[in-house]
Amino acid sequence: MTRDSGPNPRPSRSVRSAPGPASSTSSRPPDRERSSRPAAPFPAGSIPTNPLLAAGLEALDLLNIGVVVCDASAKVLTANSVAERILSDSDGLELSSDGTLSTTLVSDIGLRESITRLAGSGAEDDGAPHRALAVCRPSGKRPLTLFLRAAKERGSTQPQPAVLVLIQDSALPVETTEAELRQLYGLTAAEARISNLLMEGAGLEECCDQLGIRRTTARMHLRNIFAKTGVRRQSELVALLLRSIGLGPRRK
């Protein structure tokens, strides 16, 4: 992957609405079978009417977090670009022919049932307002992680029941520009490159190979990064950097 010392421009991303209702001939829940027909496409150029929602979904694109908004029947109302890519791959999740969010493998995780419960009462059977699910993938990659939460429009007398589905794919790289790291912690260009690689899971030796620097040079940069971020270990650094962009574990 080629890196430069300046800010990395990001491609513009679209946030699209899902297709409207379509007839379905299947009587089984969509999250218990894989449709033999191609998934219904997202219509090009369609965006949510709420500009704040569109901005929020696009912001999560920058973190490589997929977001899908479903109604009570699991029909997809809108999704951001990362979610669109995940659904189009049909590797764990897909958009069924009738526009519902479904799993690509036979599974008993109860995706549709959870969406319906959260949209209806705002809570699961145990009273929790959210649910976390792991979705197995035909490719054998690590499961997709799903976070489901009820969402209702504030200030509306008759809000439409909806559920937010956040999708995290550990196979996707963390996207943060070197410019952001330099702004947050005052890092140099070289220090920001190393920090970015560490967040993507690279070890120090791999950083040296990719950047074409000696190990002693990499260790010098790492010491400087530690001093600027206030950490003492590499694991603490990675956790701090991930928390800085909203992906790492929270302190209790």
Image (cartoon, helix red, strand yellow):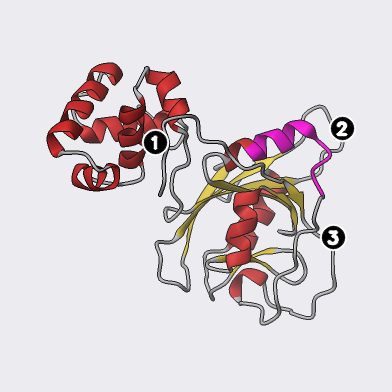
Distance Cα–Cα, label 2 vs label 1: 37 Å
Point 57% across, 63% down: residue = 110
In x, y percent, where is residue 215? 14, 38
Q: Work out whether 143 lies above or below 140.
A: above
Residue 157: mark in rendering = 2
SS under mark 2: loop
In x, y percent, where is residue 79? 69, 50
**Residues rendered magenta in the picture:** 46-58
Specify the amino acid type for callout 1: Gly
Distance Cα–Cα, label 3 vs label 1: 36 Å
Mark 1 highlights which residue? 248
Relative to 187, is 115 on the left or the right? right
| Nearer the observer, 156 or 58 | 58
Q: Work out whether 29 lies above or below 129.
A: below
SS under mark 1: loop
| Nearer the observer, 122 or 48 | 48
Point 58% across, 39% down: residue = 10
Residue density around tag 1, few if under 14, some if 14–19, many if 20 or more, within 10 Å: few
Mark 3 highlights which residue? 20
Q: Main secondary structure of the magenta part?
A: helix
